[in-house]
Each structure stands twice: as structure tokens, then as C-alpha cells.
Image: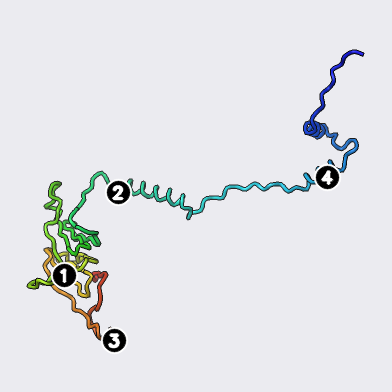
């Protein structure tokens, strides 16, 4: 006999793939195990493809990116090439007001003072308030109490008057230089019906001018 090359055995997986390609998988005798595997493969459900959901508006990452974009928009919208820092208060500033002409600014703070700034007299080397006022002080009294400033605002109709509200039941009306023009009355805290008293009996937090 001549020596003929002995064909190598084809692996089961390759043979099965070849039979499927040639369409001869149904020929011949099939074992029960093969039939069971085939039915099992046919009965298997296809794995659903899960698409990535759209990011919601309340996604923290999106909110951060939105905040960053908003910050960029703010930088583009407002001129920030120049700035001026007023280091006049010792504690946190609670309120800022400008007069109608934009020439004078008054700031209130938790250090219990009002600072008056005149823009016309400011220079790069003299950025400071021209006057500091304690709106709670009483003339002629050495033992007056001091209270943090909650709110301060210029009168939009008459910019020569300023409403100053401290952590006290009695707000005050000041002039442009910080002098007290009027003080609101204090309510009677012992009255049960508050309609019978004209003033506040505890700390006032805010106030506004009448538009007319």
C-alpha cells in the first residue's frame, strides 16, 4: 500500500459550522443530545439591546456642565476686564444700595455699621468710605446698643433719604450723610391684640419704600 496522508479529525465546532454552511445539518442520524441542544438554542430568548438613556435634566453631571456653561455665558455677557474691591467692613456685607444717579453707594454689614462711598472722590489709591455710621447709636447717650444691619435702601423718588433697618424693632430714616431724620415708633409688646399698636415689637428684617 502506498502511504497516503491521513486526514486529521475536524473539531466538532468547525464541523458543525461547516454543516450549517452547507445545509447538511439535518442529514444522517442525530443523537438526542444534539437535538436537545438545538431546541435549547432555538428556544433561547434573544438578549435585548439596552440603549443608553438620554441624560435627564436633573443629572448632577449635566447640572455641573450647565452651571459651567452658565458661568461662561455670564463672563461673556458682563464686562469683567476691570473690577474694584471695597474692603471697608470687618464682617459680612448684608445690603447694598445706590442712589438714583449712581454717584453714591451705601453698604450695611454685620459689623453694625453703614459705610458711605462717593464714587466721584474715589481714586485707585483711595478706595474707602468717606463716612462710617452706626444707625443704632443715640446722640447724647454713651451706652447705646449696636445691632447688625439687615437692610438699607435709598428712596427712589427722593434720593436724599435712606431707609436703614437693623436687628431692632425701630427702623430709621437717614439723610445722604448718615444723620438721623426720623425713627419709627416701637410697639407695645404687652398688648395681646397687635392691631392696637403701631410699631413692631421684635426685630425688623426688611423694608421698602412706597413707589409714590
207, above or below 51, in the image: below
Looking at marks 3 and 1 on the same chain, the residue that comes earlier in the sequence is marked by 1
Q: Secondary structure at mark 2?
A: loop
Q: Secondary structure at mark 4?
A: helix
Q: CA distance from mark 4 to mark 1?
A: 94 Å
x and y percent of residue 43 in the render?
A: 78, 48
Looking at marks 2 and 4 on the same chain, the residue that comes earlier in the sequence is marked by 4
Looking at marks 4 and 1 on the same chain, the residue that comes earlier in the sequence is marked by 4
Q: Are marks 2 and 1 in contact (CB under 8 Å)?
A: no
Q: Which numbered circle lies on residue 36? A: 4
Residue drawn at x 29%, y 86% is: 193
Q: CA distance from mark 2 to mark 4?
A: 74 Å
Q: Nearer the viewer, mark 4 or mark 3?
A: 4
160, above or below 103, in the image: below
Judge left or right: residue 123 versus residue 38.
left
Looking at marks 2 and 3 on the same chain, the residue that comes earlier in the sequence is marked by 2
The residue that label 3 is drawn on is: 192
x and y percent of residue 208 in the render?
A: 25, 69
Q: Secondary structure at mark 3?
A: loop
Judge left or right: residue 137 versus residue 37.
left
| Viewer-nearest residue: 147 or 197 | 147
Spot the residue most to the top: 2
| Residue 11 visible in the picture | yes
The figure's colour scheme reads rainbow
Q: Dot 2: within a 10 Å radius of its alpha carbon, few (fewer than 14), some, or many (20 or more) residues?
A: few
Judge left or right: residue 126 versus residue 66.
left
Q: CA distance from mark 2 to mark 3?
A: 52 Å
x and y percent of residue 187 in the render?
A: 22, 81
Amino acid at each position: 500500500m502506498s502511504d497516503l496522508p491521513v486526514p486529521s479529525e475536524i473539531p466538532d465546532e468547525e464541523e458543525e459550522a461547516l454543516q450549517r454552511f452547507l445545509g447538511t445539518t439535518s442529514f444522517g442520524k442525530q443523537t438526542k443530545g444534539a437535538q436537545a441542544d438545538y431546541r435549547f438554542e432555538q428556544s433561547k430568548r434573544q438578549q435585548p439591546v439596552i440603549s443608553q438613556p438620554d441624560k435627564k435634566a436633573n443629572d448632577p453631571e449635566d447640572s455641573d456642565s450647565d452651571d459651567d456653561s452658565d458661568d461662561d455665558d455670564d463672563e461673556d455677557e458682563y464686562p469683567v476686564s476691570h473690577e474694584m474691591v471695597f474692603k471697608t467692613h470687618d464682617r459680612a456685607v448684608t445690603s447694598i444700595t445706590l442712589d438714583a444717579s449712581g454717584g453714591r453707594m451705601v453698604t450695611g454689614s454685620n459689623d453694625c455699621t453703614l459705610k458711605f462711598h462717593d464714587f466721584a472722590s474715589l481714586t485707585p489709591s483711595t478706595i474707602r468710605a468717606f463716612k462710617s455710621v452706626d444707625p443704632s447709636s443715640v446722640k447724647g447717650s454713651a451706652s447705646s446698643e449696636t445691632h447688625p444691619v439687615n437692610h438699607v435702601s435709598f428712596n427712589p423718588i427722593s434720593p436724599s433719604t435712606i431707609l436703614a433697618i437693623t436687628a431692632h424693632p425701630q427702623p430709621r430714616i437717614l439723610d445722604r450723610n448718615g444723620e438721623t431724620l426720623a425713627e419709627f415708633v416701637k410697639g407695645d409688646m404687652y398688648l395681646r391684640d397687635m392691631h392696637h399698636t403701631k410699631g413692631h415689637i421684635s426685630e425688623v428684617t426688611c423694608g421698602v419704600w412706597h413707589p409714590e
